[in-house]
Image (spheres, coloured by chain):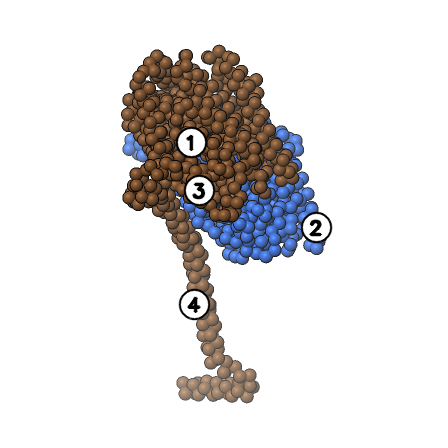
């Protein structure tokens, strides 16, 4: 079965090609069917690969499947080949599983769109590249997927390309991602040439990880840092997160699939995959964790005051990705990947739920114009609330287990600052999520009459995926619960991959044992604290936004009052710290001006020299022309004139009259005679 | 003499060179100018047969042989050591194929575009093909020079007669620029001939013989400068590039295609074929300088490109940037860089040729090249939009397209040579994405509008057929580049080795000169 792994990316690719080439003539039903079936088949194959894999003994669970030789040059060989191991299997399960649900949902959500076929073609293509990214067995295949998902993200964000804001957002996403890729590709080159100076001409994970200990730790540090720059771009971390909020211009299922569940987690996957490198570079790990936890807090604080239902979720995604990086940066790779998985469930659910709301509200995204939707959208409202509880970290939902594991890892490894910031972020998360829930679903509807009239629950094709995801958001954490006998199942499953570095291996093993043996009272206290933070956040949000609770709130605790009291802070948050404006002023506009200058220089100076050379040549030739006419030819002509003048004098003698000649003759004879006679 | 000798059998290279010229003569002498349809079909027939003939080469090519293949050699002017010497190796093979393919595409691209003086137009295109192939195949420097100069003539007429608004200005600028450069090159060739003769006693223009004994580095330096002026103008390298935007803007569509896809390659080819092996010491000594201006051109060209408002000018400036990649690949002196350089030559021919082709299609409909005159074309012309996007992506080096493979090798080579080469180059790649995506956004996205009258139609059958081979090549090289890389592998490895040995020979030559200079003085001192 495992040998058939190449079918998993191939099926969505075939779906994309069929829909792309013939989709416009196939009819919507066929298009949707092709796209969803290819995903369903890919998911089923992934599931059976998962079972084949766990049937193998633990040490054999890493199988490379080659497809063909892609780039070769001398000793340099890069194959298109796949690596099936616990990490990649988990990733393909998430990608194809959540991907399939989102495809089904999209069939309902996009039903009225004219470019239905184009949408599904892009979406399938995206899944293809995402699967290449997580399945590739070497860095270049990963890079192929890495760039490919960026391209599809560009295409899908700008799907409604008639809107300027959509096409701008797509372009921004692509370019900002490429800034990150700048680091990624340099990291790859550094890795490649360092290895080849050790006589290793390969970029496959197995060889790289096996030989990484022979390399200079400083170089490994540089490689890890450069690769992380790529992750900052792709996974929307500070300072390159700016594209993700704008990416909400795309259709909502796209946001769910690409900008929540799969693509943005690629950076986390990459760091986890390279744990052998990162465990050799603890300084980089520190940086990763710091950037992660800072981003978590930073984005959560922006999320507190946003009014656009999708923007809140976007900042929330940035924030949760920060959590994951905090985990992998601290070497808690399993915790990071665990949160990646549960986040895919609940954030996918939340995005799809917001899509259902937007669908019902005829495209309205401003939460100020919503409210009271619970009455009309029962399924959406309940599933959305489940998602919100999960992300707020309320037990026993999935988000609780994964978030708590990250906080526990931070605490137990002694990173108290990270733990504290993480806790604060957890509180903020609960607050902004329930602010969103209450604003959207409770109280009175604030929409205009026309919109109100059209409010309706989404069809089953959309609500069933919501229910399935809600189920996963509830129970998805089971695999990672540390209290069962033998500790967390996920730890067991992933630890062969995520403990390549001997140092990391010891750490993970140690942590695992520590967790298993001593579910000490400390851990339960910490759990209680983080649950408390979540509950407090929900409660405070309720006091401010949930009508039945509002009356209990102290008089200063209203949204308007707080915004007024902390007006500068509110303004700063509302305007997202003005980061976009700062980037425009500091980077974008200067570059635009530089381009203008370059062009003026090119036309004015470089081409100016060329044209003036031409002009000077023509001037010189004009001068020499005049010189020729007046001086050179003038000389010739004046000679002629002189001769002419001369001859005009002497010509008078040549009269041609015989009598004149006779007269002169006689005169001459007379002169001679006189001379002779007198002499 | 150890160079390859005349091989028997069918003279395939001469056939390839002169068949299009015969076709041109046929069109001129046997077809009346009113027979438009027939002229088109004859030109297409000649170009297609030529392309099919050129396919004989890859099928009989021996990838393991680093040397010249299908060699033809006869003495031409014995007194001056000039021979008629043709050969193709792994470096020129792909360029020859590119030339024959692009000519077919050019004929098809002009199918409805050109209505006036069709006869001369088609004949000139076939002549351009003849001369370009001559440049890629000639191994005798005199023969090379003749073809090199001859290429200019049909191209100048194509721009000057069938061109756009400022066609005379552009044609003359193009002519004078390249002609002046070529004269310096001729000086260089003659100097090489003379010094080599003085050194060895054999006066010859045969480049294979010339590469066997290397003249002193001090002389190499000046010959390199002379060659540089000739080749750099053609590439074009900063600061000799300003003829390019004008020539491209005013050339007819097919003229732009052949200019970008074939003519620019003559310059980079010249560097690889002659500067590196014949002037190894100067090349290596000036390598950092060459790499420096190449990197500068990559960034500078990209920045100028971003500021453009005219689509054709934009693509022309992007060529300056892209050819910088090729030059950088050549002058980092490792196999990766060279391989990337040669592959980028082919890739640039495919991608930029296709961009000009596509721009020509829209120009033929709307008669404007200004970006501001179009928006939202994707809605009205989806097929066109998809083609344009694919080519734009290939041009910015997206994986699974040809551009990625080429840029990857250039970057690998640059990184190997010096980490600080790679950083600005990656910035250049980034800027490439900026200008291409911005161009795509401005033309294709948004609400449909264009400044002209009448509806714009999507691509027709002929237009799809013309563009399709290039699209296929984009993916072929991107997904399965093995045959292309294999073709050049042996020859490039050999070239690197040759540069290294010749570098040593050159140093020896300089030692000999110093020895010879010092010997008499020592004698004198002894007396």
The answer as to whether the residues below labels 3 and 2 share one chain is no
Upstream in sequence: badge 1 or badge 4: 1
Classed neighbour count for the residue bearing mark 3: other residues with Cα under 10 Å, few (<14), some (14–19), many (≥20)? some
Q: To which residue does mark 2 refer?
A: B37
- Of tags 1 and 3, which is closer to the observer? 3
Q: Secondary structure at mark 1?
A: helix
Q: Chain of mark 2?
A: B
Q: Are marks 3 and 2 in contact (CB under 8 Å)?
A: no
* Gap in angstroms between the C-alphas marked 2 and 1: 71 Å
Of A404 and B411, the residue lying toward us: A404
* Gap in angstroms between the C-alphas marked 1 and 4: 97 Å
Q: Secondary structure at mark 3?
A: loop
Q: Secondary structure at mark 2?
A: helix
Upstream in sequence: badge 1 or badge 3: 1
Q: Which mark is residue B348?
A: none
- Of tags 3 and 4, which is closer to the observer? 3
Q: To which residue does mark 4 refer?
A: A631
Estimate the x, y position of residue A262 in percent, counting from the top left: 47, 30
> At 51% from the left edge and 12% from the top edge, which residue is drawn?
A56
Upstream in sequence: badge 3 or badge 4: 3
Of B447 and A102, the residue lying toward us: A102
> At 60% from the left edge and 34% from the top edge, which residue is drawn?
A32
Q: Are marks 4 and 2 in contact (CB under 8 Å)?
A: no
Q: Is residue B256 left or right of residue B307?
A: right
Q: Is residue A183 left or right of residue A56?
A: left
Q: To which residue does mark 3 refer?
A: A444
In the figure, what tint was chain B given? blue
Chain shown brown: that is A
Q: To which residue does mark 1 refer?
A: A388
């Amino acid at each position: 079965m495992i040998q058939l792994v190449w079918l998993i990316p191939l099926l969505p690719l075939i779906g994309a090609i069929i829909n792309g080439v013939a989709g416009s003539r196939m009819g919507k039903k066929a298009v949707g069917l092709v796209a969803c079936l290819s995903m369903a088949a890919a998911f089923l194959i992934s599931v059976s690969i998962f079972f084949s894999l766990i049937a193998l003994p633990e040490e054999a669970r890493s199988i490379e499947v080659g497809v063909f030789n892609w780039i070769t040059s001398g000793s340099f060989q890069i194959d298109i080949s796949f690596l099936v191991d616990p990490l990649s299997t988990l990733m393909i399960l998430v990608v194809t599983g959540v991907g399939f649900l989102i495809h089904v949902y999209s069939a309902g959500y996009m039903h009225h769109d004219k470019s239905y076929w184009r949408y599904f073609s892009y979406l399938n293509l995206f899944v293809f590249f995402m699967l290449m990214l997580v399945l590739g067995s070497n860095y270049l295949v990963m890079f192929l997927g890495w760039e490919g998902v960026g391209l599809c993200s560009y295409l899908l964000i700008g799907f409604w390309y008639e809107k300027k804001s959509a096409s701008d957002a797509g372009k921004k996403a692509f370019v900002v991602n490429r800034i990150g890729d700048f680091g990624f590709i340099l990291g790859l080159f550094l890795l490649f040439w360092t290895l080849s100076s050790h006589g290793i001409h390969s970029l496959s994970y197995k060889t790289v990880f096996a030989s990484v200990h022979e390399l200079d730790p400083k170089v490994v540090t540089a490689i890890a840092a450069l690769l992380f720059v790529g992750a900052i771009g792709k996974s929307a971390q500070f300072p390159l997160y700016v594209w993700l909020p704008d990416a909400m211009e795309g259709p909502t299922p796209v946001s769910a699939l690409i900008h929540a569940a799969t693509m943005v987690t690629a950076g986390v996957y990459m760091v986890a995959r390279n744990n052998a490198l990162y465990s050799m570079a603890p300084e980089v790990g520190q940086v990763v964790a710091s950037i992660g936890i800072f981003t978590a807090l930073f984005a959560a604080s922006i999320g507190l005051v946003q009014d656009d239902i999708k923007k809140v979720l976007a900042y929330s995604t940035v924030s949760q990705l920060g959590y994951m990086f905090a985990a992998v940066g601290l070497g808690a790779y399993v915790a990071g990947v665990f949160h990646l998985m549960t986040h895919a469930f609940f954030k996918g659910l939340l995005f799809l739920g917001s899509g259902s709301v937007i669908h019902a509200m005829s495209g309205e995204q401003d939460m100020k114009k919503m409210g009271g939707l619970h009455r009309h959208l029962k399924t959406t409202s309940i599933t959305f609330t489940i998602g919100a509880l999960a992300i707020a970290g309320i037990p026993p939902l999935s988000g609780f287990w994964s978030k708590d594991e990250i906080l526990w890892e931070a605490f137990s490894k002694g990173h108290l600052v990270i733990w504290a910031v993480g806790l604060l972020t957890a509180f903020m998360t609960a607050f902004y999520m329930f602010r969103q829930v209450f604003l959207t679903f409770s109280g009175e509807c604030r929409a205009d009459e026309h919109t109100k009239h059209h409010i309706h629950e989404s069809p089953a094709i959309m609500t069933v995926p919501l229910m399935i995801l809600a189920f996963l958001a509830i129970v998805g954490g089971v695999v990672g619960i540390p209290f069962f006998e033998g500790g967390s199942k996920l730890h067991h499953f992933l630890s062969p991959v995520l403990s390549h570095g001997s140092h990391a291996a010891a750490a993970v093993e140690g942590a695992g044992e520590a967790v298993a043996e001593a579910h000490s009272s400390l851990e339960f206290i910490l759990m209680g604290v983080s649950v408390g933070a979540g509950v407090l956040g929900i409660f405070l949000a309720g006091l401010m936004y949930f009508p039945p609770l509002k009356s209990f709130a102290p008089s200063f605790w209203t949204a308007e009052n707080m915004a007024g009291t902390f007006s500068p802070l509110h303004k700063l948050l509302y305007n997202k710290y003005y980061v976009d404006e700062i980037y425009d002023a500091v980077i974008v506009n200067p570059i635009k001006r530089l381009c203008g200058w370059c062009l003026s220089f090119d036309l004015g100076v470089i081409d100016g020299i060329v044209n003036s050379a031409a002009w000077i040549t023509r001037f010189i030739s004009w001068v020499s022309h005049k010189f020729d006419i007046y001086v050179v030819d003038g000389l010739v002509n004046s000679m002629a004139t002189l001769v002419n003048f001369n001859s005009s004098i002497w010509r008078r003698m040549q009269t041609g009259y015989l009598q004149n000649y006779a007269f002169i003759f006689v005169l001459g004879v007379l002169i001679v005679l006189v001379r002779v006679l007198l002499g | 003499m150890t160079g390859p000798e005349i091989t028997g059998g069918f003279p395939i290279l001469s056939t390839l060179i002169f068949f299009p010229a015969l076709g041109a003569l046929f069109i001129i002498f046997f077809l009346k100018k009113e027979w438009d349809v027939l002229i088109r079909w004859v030109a297409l027939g000649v170009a297609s047969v030529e392309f099919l003939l050129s396919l004989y080469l890859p099928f009989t090519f021996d990838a393991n042989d680093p040397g010249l293949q299908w060699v033809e050699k006869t003495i031409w002017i014995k007194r001056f050591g000039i021979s008629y010497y043709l050969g193709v190796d792994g470096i020129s093979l792909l360029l020859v194929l590119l030339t024959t393919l692009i000519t077919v595409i050019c004929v098809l691209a002009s199918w409805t575009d050109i209505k006036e003086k069709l006869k001369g137009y088609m004949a000139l295109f076939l002549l351009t093909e003849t001369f370009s192939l001559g440049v890629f195949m000639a191994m005798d420097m005199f023969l090379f020079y003749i073809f090199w100069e001859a290429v200019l003539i049909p191209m100048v007429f194509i721009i000057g007669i069938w061109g756009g608004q400022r066609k005379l200005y552009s044609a003359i600028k193009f002519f004078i620029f390249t002609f002046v450069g070529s004269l310096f090159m001729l000086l260089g060739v003659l100097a090489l001939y003379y010094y080599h003769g003085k050194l060895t006693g054999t006066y010859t223009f045969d480049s294979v013989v010339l590469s066997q004994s290397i003249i002193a580095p001090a002389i190499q330096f000046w010959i390199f400068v002379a060659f540089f002026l000739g080749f750099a103008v053609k590439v074009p390298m900063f600061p000799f590039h300003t003829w390019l935007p004008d020539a491209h803007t005013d050339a007819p569509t097919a003229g732009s295609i052949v200019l970008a896809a074939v003519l620019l390659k003559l310059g980079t080819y010249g560097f690889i074929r002659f500067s590196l092996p014949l002037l190894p010491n100067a090349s290596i000594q000036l390598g950092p300088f060459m790499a420096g201006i190449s990197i500068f051109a990559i960034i500078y060209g990209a920045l100028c490109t971003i500021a453009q408002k005219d689509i054709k000018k934009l693509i022309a400036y992007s060529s300056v940037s892209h050819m910088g990649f090729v030059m950088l690949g050549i002058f980092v002196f490792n196999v990766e860089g060279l391989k990337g350089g040669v592959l980028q030559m082919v890739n640039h021919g495919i991608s930029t040729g296709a961009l000009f082709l596509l721009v020509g299609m829209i120009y033929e409909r709307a008669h404007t090249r200004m970006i501001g005159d179009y928006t939202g074309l994707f809605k009205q012309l989806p097929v066109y939009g998809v083609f344009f996007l694919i080519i734009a992506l290939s041009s910015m080096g997206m994986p699974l397209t040809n551009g990625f493979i080429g840029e990857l090798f250039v970057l690998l080579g640059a990184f190997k040579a010096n980490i600080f080469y790679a950083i600005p180059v990656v910035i250049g790649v980034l800027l490439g994405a900026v200008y291409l995506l911005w161009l795509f956004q401005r033309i294709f996205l948004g609400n449909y509008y264009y400044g002209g009258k009448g509806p714009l139609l999507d691509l027709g059958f002929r237009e799809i057929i013309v563009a399709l081979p290039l699209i296929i090549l984009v993916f072929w090289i991107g997904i399965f580049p093995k045959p292309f890389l294999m073709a050049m592998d042996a020859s490039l490895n050999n070239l690197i080795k040759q540069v290294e040995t010749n570098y040593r020979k050159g140093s020896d030559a300089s030692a000999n000169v110093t020895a010879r200079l010092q010997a008499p003085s020592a004698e004198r001192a002894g007396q």
